[in-house]
Amino acid sequence: MSKALPLMIQGTHSDAGKSVVVTAFCRIFKQDGYHTAPFKSQNMALNSYITLDGKEIGRAQGVQAEAAGVLATTDMNPILIKPNRENESQIVVHGKPYKNMQAGQYRSEFFYQGLQLIEEALTSLSEKYERIVIEGAGSPAEINLNDRELVNMRVANIADAPVILVGDIDKGGVFASLVGTLQLLSSSDRDRVIGVIINKFHGDIKLLEPGLTWFEEYTGKTVLGVIPYLRNLNIDAEDSVILDRYKADEDKTKDIDIAVIQYPKISNFTDVDPFFVESDCHVRFITKADQLKQPDLIILPGSKNTIEDLLFLKKNGLMDKILALHNDHKPIIFGICGGFQMLGLSIEDPDEIESTHLKESGLGLLPLKTTITTEKTTILSEGTLSFGDTLTHVTGYEIHMGKTAFVGDYEPFIQMEDKEEGCKNADERVLGMYFHGIFHNDEFRKNLLNKIRLEKGLLELNERISFQQIRESAFDRLADHVRKHVQLDKINEKMKEFHLRRKKMTKFTNYSIPALDKDTGHQVNEYMNTLTKPPGSLGRLEELARNLAEMTSNPFPIVTPPGVIVFAADHGITDEGVSAFPQEVTGQMVKNFLTGGAAINVFSKQISAQFEIVDIGVATDIEGEALISKKVRYGTGNFSKENAMTRDEAKKALEVGFTEAEKLIQKGVKCLILGEMGIGNTTTSSAILAAISGKDIQSLVGFGTGIPQEKIIHKQQVIEEALKARKPDPTDPIDILSKVGGLEIAGMAGAMLAAASNRIPILVDGFICTVAALVAKLISPDAANYMIVSHRSVEPGHLTAIKLLEKEPLIDLRLRLGEGSGAAVAFPLLESATLMLKEMATFTSAGVSDKA
């Protein structure tokens, strides 16, 4: 993130008040002069909001944008999940339906795609706004889901945002939920929490103060605020969990009784919010026929599964009760969206988009038939509504997947610019439309309520509230309330501290990787077809030539001289007996490199490479004039018993690699080859690969330095148990390196990032180097564009790593040495590809006839 200061609000559980607290901070920052955006990476909600360009996002993010005084965009909620049937949801990506997915399918298939969407959206917002207020979901301590969560601490890490944890004291056990949540977080995630807010407090704060003192002493976290319960807020609710608070009982003190049918898949129930602030209205949510009584207005709201909710009305007697009331000419019946469809003659779902029921008869109160289709309408709408003797301009929004056809004569409800919308019966006692937000139109709402008042023998009320004014006042009221009860100065201070920390982040993160130059690649393709050979006859050499041209942005790419950097470090995991050689061999081999006796020395000399050896973490001190000593620590910890290193050490190792590669590039090298030396590093690499790939460890572990079969089994068991204990996050490369290692792997990854940022091709060596390449790709996916895999090792995990890089090795010589040796052996193939372009004659220059 570059410009914006982020703040993330997470909760100990659902309905802790995260959405409202985010709304408050959006308004507070707006009041304080900051251009602010809300953000929720992934929202599971049936209440939607339509952006100005007709895209669908979670209603909470739309409302938060209003509080911030900005237009809502899909960057504020790139992924919306809308449950539509048992264990299945519609996935909405950047405001448009993507596909329906089962929960398990979403976790397994959508994770990496979702991660990229989130990173791109956050990057976009950070470039346009000064502050971003991020909302989490549920709890960050859902240990059964955290390996692939996309909405809590993983987002905080992407944004590098400080986190405030919100607890709901109204439900009881607030200290237990706060402490328990903190204890279940990893140490790095716990460090990101700058404090807690206790929400929905009732009573005397003095009685709570001993608990606050205890909490701060026990956890070391600051209580940043205790927010008293704020009633009658008049801000849209996040989702249907709020409906449990509404009663089905009548209120005889109110003139108008409104019954809202609460079916299981109710959506956009916030359509009825304006009635809550009308002094003469009582709103009830109804789930059973005997609760309906004798209302003045029945509202059938939207539904995410119209046929299933229609069956709900039939099975519990609500449909019969509504029809009986209609036949007695008692209530006005009003359907919106799915409710509008239910009022018709039938609903069909021939493709089983929402339900396995292909067709179901409706209430039969309006002359229309609906067919559920895959095409989704999402649009802001306006038109002229005809009701009684008045015409009223109205605005709203449409979200539906059905196409409705009218049967015979019908009376339209709204005249839009290009079509008629909705339908009503002759006496205007049955009304329906696709317009959400219809009751937010003050003039129409007044006319509807006055019609009911006159029918009941009551005087009209012509002075009614402006719902938009009430909403704006509610934002200010909420902001003032929260501002009064939280330590805003401290929160601002912590946000700035995190921002300064980001500016001081290690050098390896302060780079940009350019896109491949596809135009130059196309130019080279055309040129190769003019050379004196049949097109494509040099096979992969031609692919290499084009790839190198795209990488270097040069139609005649240069790869000489190459540079070779070997990073050396030790691994604490060798204590578990996973290697054929003792740990001291690492230092001994470094001395061998310094005297020119290793294979990589010989092969580097053969290709005229500039050669460097870097001590990034050998367990002993080594002297040598040619040795570059950049020791981050004396070997890693034994990751079967402890983390391999700290996050800061992992970042430092990446920085070392980045810096050393840049130095070599500044000396003029045109291709980078990386090698490693570290006893035990195949064990570490196998663990990293298992974490990233999710593959069974047995399929990844091989002979390494030449261990027998019984040691392979032992090695597999050690890795398996260590991964269970360490639980590295497969999407967080720093977490993986800090928990598993190794220092030389981090160094190679950092060097690859430096090469990619300078348009230098990277010739990737064997198993360990390819695992380092995967780490670099996790840090910056574009880095992989500059990688060429030199060869396939006999290590069984190497093929898996190559596939994850989406590469094809140049050669297979059954190598398993490492050090960069295989890449050095393969380097002449790169030279051949470049010399083909530079020195081969064209048909014209050679006077050779091209094919007829």
Image (cartoon, rainbow, N blue to C red):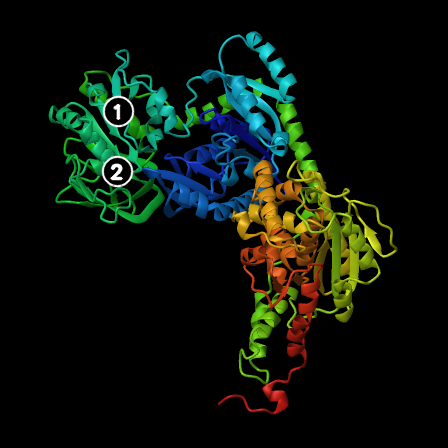
Q: SS for tag 2?
A: helix
Residue flagged by tag 2: what amino acid is it?
Thr
Residue flagged by tag 1: what amino acid is it?
Thr
Residue that badge 1 annotates: 287
Residue 785 location, quadrant = bottom right
Q: Quadrant of the N terminus?
A: top right
> Which residue is at the front of the view, 67 or 688?
688
Neighbours of disc 1 within 10 Å: few (<14), some (14-19), many (20+): some
Asked if labels 2 and 1 touch by Cβ distance under 8 angstroms, the answer is no
Residue 335: x, y in percent? 24, 33
Is residue 477 placed above or below 780 in the rendered structure? above
Neighbours of disc 2 within 10 Å: few (<14), some (14-19), many (20+): many
Residue depicted at x 65% and y 24%: 490
Is residue 295 placed above or below 404 in the rendered structure? above
How far is the residue under mark 1 from the one under mark 2? Answer: 16 Å
Task: Count numbered badges in the picture.
Answer: 2
Residue 622: x, y in percent? 84, 49
Q: Could you say which disc has been placed on residue 755 in the image?
A: none
Residue depicted at x 54% and y 28%: 25
Residue depicted at x 66% and y 36%: 642
> Which residue is at the front of the view, 653 or 436?
653
Residue 169: x, y in percent? 49, 17
Describe residue 378's horizontal placement relative to residue 390 as left or right: right
Residue that badge 2 annotates: 306
Is residue 76 placed above or below 544 in the rendered structure? above
- Residue 229 visible in the displayed image: no
Is residue 467 placed above or below 524 in the rendered structure? above
Residue 819 location, quadrant = bottom right
Q: SS for tag 1?
A: loop
Describe residue 841's horizontal placement relative to residue 96 as left or right: right
Describe residue 286's horizontal placement relative to residue 91 as left or right: left
